[in-house]
Image: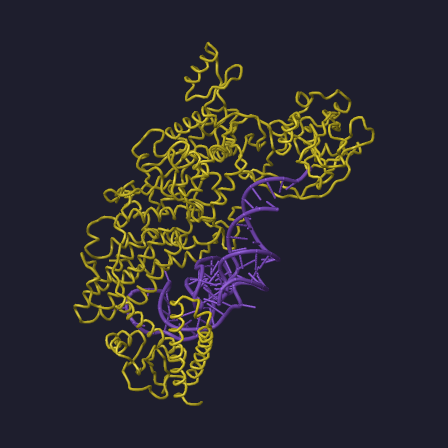
Chain colours: A yellow, B purple
Amino acid sequence: MLEKTHDSTATEPRIYAAWEAAGAFRAGAAARDGAETFTIVIPPPNVTGSLHIGHALNNTLQDILIRFERMRGRDVLWQPGMDHAGIATQMVVERQMMERQEPGRREIGRAAFVDKVWAWQAESGGDILNQLKRLGCSCDWDRERFTLDEGLSKAVLKVFVDLYRDDLIYRDKRLVNWDPKLQTAVSDLEVENVEIPGHLWHFKYPIEEQEGRFIVVATTRPETMLGDTGVAVHPDDERYRDLVGKNAILPLVGRRMRIVADEHADPELGSGAVKITPAHDFNDFEVGKRHDLPMVNVFDAEANVVLKDNEDFLAGVPQSDDLAATIAALDGLDRFAARKRVVALMEERGLIATVEDKPVMVPHDEKSKTTVIEPYLTDQWFADAKTLAKPAIASVREGRTRFVPKTWEKTYFEWMENIQPWCISRQLWWGHQIPAWYGPDGTVFVAHSEEEAQADAEAHYGRAEPLTRDPDVLDTWFSSALWPFSTLGWPEETPELARYYPTTTLVTAFDIIFFWVARMMMMGLHFTGKEPFRDVYLHALVRDETGAKMSKSKGNVIDPLDLVDQYGADALRFTLASITAQGRDIKLATSRVEGYRNFATKLWNAARFAEHHDCRVVDGFDPAEAKETLNRWIATETTRAARSVTTAIEGYRFNEAASALYRFVWHQFCDWYVEFAKPILTGDDEGARDETRATVAWGLRRIVELLHPLMPFITEDLAAKLPGATAADGAPLMLSRWPELDFEDTAAADEINWMIDLIAAIRSVRADVNVPAGARIPVTVSGANDVTRARLATHATLIKRLARLESLDLADGPTPRSAQIVIGEATVCMPLSGVVDIEAERSRLSNELAKVGKEIAKLDAKLANEQFLAKAPDEVIAVQRARLEEASTLRTKTEAALARLGSG
RNA sequence: GGGCGCGUAGCUCAGCGGGAGAGCACUACGUUGACAUCGUAGGGGUCACUGGUUCAAUCCCAGUCGCGCCCACCA
């Protein structure tokens, strides 16, 4: 017995547990012999993460593909796992330690801290995987991996050492984006530029040996002047031609700085002269290298000014009172305090030409949002992304990996073709520690282990020397880049790697193309020689109803788990699938989730209907052998729906799959088929009744199969509860076969679809002319041809029932004083006496006439156009002609009907 | 500055060369023992604007306006 209502809260966990117990998630479950593989690696969520709506979308789409292909008999693997998320996790644990007023990480030391993080993870990490289960995700959980687990660490180690030995990883002193709070390098990609109000100060720098002459430079960051080592002007700039090669004197400091000619200086901007601070500005770094200017770093790791014992700063600067005063005033100040002081000092000396208010773009850490990132000169490890990118570009260019939608390929190329060296080291403790050891003289030994490094050192030095390991860890994305093959066991040549790699499809949001997709392409190709995936399906980002980014501070976050609680995972999943076609932002309205919850209810009730009427699944029943037109029709429509759903999912058009299912289940199966079936199921034609029972059950079974990838829970539940043979074998629906249907009876389809049009037309006119809903009215049909007469004869009972008719009789001609509906060649008449509002009918017919008149005028004009006749395809012309003919008939008959009504 | 996306019914969005669609919201009416989480019917749109291509443009092209995103730059 089906319960009165579907209780998703109680049902979903029960069903999920049953799937797990049945081993239904395991790789290869339900695979046909010799089946092709279908592999997806999950975008590993952060251990610190909790399920947000973006995860819900991302994983729902993956699960739809996985369930679909599993049912199609492919050898399916959905590889799950998590990312150790270096910075995020370290921050979470540090914050917790602070809240508990425990000693900080530097106090307890690296080993103890890393232990603490592992402990935190064991206790609080990884909730998100359980949340994915609530969504219904059918990952092979037995294969769960973690970017920091033993196997993956081994992969990371090998990749680092191999790339180093191939000169694709190197150590270099370069400017990087530095987070002075976390004291680590951060990725270019993690820097978010925020526009805030600021100032542009124009400073006057004196020219050496030219009393009273200045060169004016401008800056938004005055404190960096302490590190100035040159001034640049454009080579073609007449104003400064004589100064090129001369020196300027850095105020406050006294450093002599060369004035160089460099294209970087834009004569149009400001004075046309630029101060050059190679150690604190990315452009200046390049200019400095071109002209061999000294690099003077004036900050420590926390971005406090360091002048006093700063050899670079003091090098070549003559001792002076001025310098001493500057050091006294600025040394040790943080960068923002130093900014104010520098401005004040310059002002005192009358060296500020002008100050303008100006909005400036300030780089912020994308994660903490608050910390201002500082370009900072440090030693870091870099990967030669330019070299690695080349084959990755070619793979997409030549179609071996395909982006869906294709438009994202452009973004990918754009970035890959201008790729910068990838800074892969981070000054953190949580992550893969870099396998590099330094000898006493600083020689680097990169090796798979300390023992190996020792041996290399001994070979190098001729004796054993103490080594110290590089304290840095790798960028989290370094290990993520290996995910498609490291999770399958690489570098071991495991059977899984051989079978499931390369993977089939990657499903991810477009904002992660640079971080992840591009890097997986690079690493996958370099280490396996194969593209890590055939397709990359990129979906949009989810926004709230008004299109705003969801954020905790705005309070507009929609928690997917709340939606699951309220409407069920099925409803949420169906909603997410149905909105995937939207552009780059998806706006989620909860009213839609509610609508699809109602859809689930609708399906549930259809099943209850079937149960009430004893519609049992009959083994071996084939609707192709059905006798009833009605049953042949619904079987045909089922075939058509199955085809639409199949091609839609194959083409990643999830919304089309959803709408095809919605339309079919609600507006064909429930609205019409069930209504048509009612009289048969309660009638006394036993043959028809049995056939219809079987067809109803057959149809429902196909529906739960087709709907399963989108709504796995309710369909699984119903599959078990639908009475009949199939339910008895105990196999879960999720491991059953996807419907491959080919039965189509066009004549049956046309016949029933004609009847639907007829009933809809009668209902519509009834309402228009104000026939009370409950009134049963007599109706006559005149002018019917043989086909129509036959159809009327066959379906009279149904038509009468669904159109609320008292009688349906053939007549020689239209009944006078009646409402008249033109259906093709026939006219349907409803008597006016008593039931029909004659004025309403008159205006209805007049409106109809006006409408059809317009239509005819349009078609006439079109068909009179010789160009159209000459150039349009015959097919199109034929359609227009048929349409004109139809419209003309309608006009004639409507005119006649209006005439028959007489004048008011 | 470069690139991308979006402007279609009150709202959220499909469609994308040959008759303007869905869901929600709205209006009216509820009769049918699967379903009021429902049923039936209905109103509502110069498909942002301007040009062009075409026999034909919501759809293709160019431009304009508006909204949003990404990248770069801003000394």
Whether residue A759 is visible here, answered yes or no, is yes
> In the image shown, does A878 or A765 lie closer to the viewer?
A878
Q: Is residue A195 left or right of residue A784?
A: right
Provide residue A337's location: percent of width, then percent of height.
68, 33
Whether residue A555 is visible here, answered yes or no, is no
Q: Is residue A14 left or right of residue A284?
A: left
Provide residue A244's location: percent of width, then percent of height.
73, 30
Q: Is residue A596 above or below residue A302?
A: below
Provide residue A105's location: percent of width, then percent of height.
51, 27
Q: Quadrant of residue A162?
A: top left
Q: Is residue A242 above or below residue A319?
A: below
The N terminus of chain A lies in quadrant: bottom left
Q: Is residue A389 left or right of residue A209?
A: left
Q: Is residue A250 above or below residue A843?
A: above
Determine the residue positioned at 31% across, 69% down.
A753
Provide residue A440's location: percent of width, then percent of height.
52, 14
Residue sitting farthest toward the right: A211
Q: Is residue A49 above or below residue A446?
A: below
Residue sitting farthest toward the bottom: A903
Q: Is residue A295 left or right of residue A777?
A: right
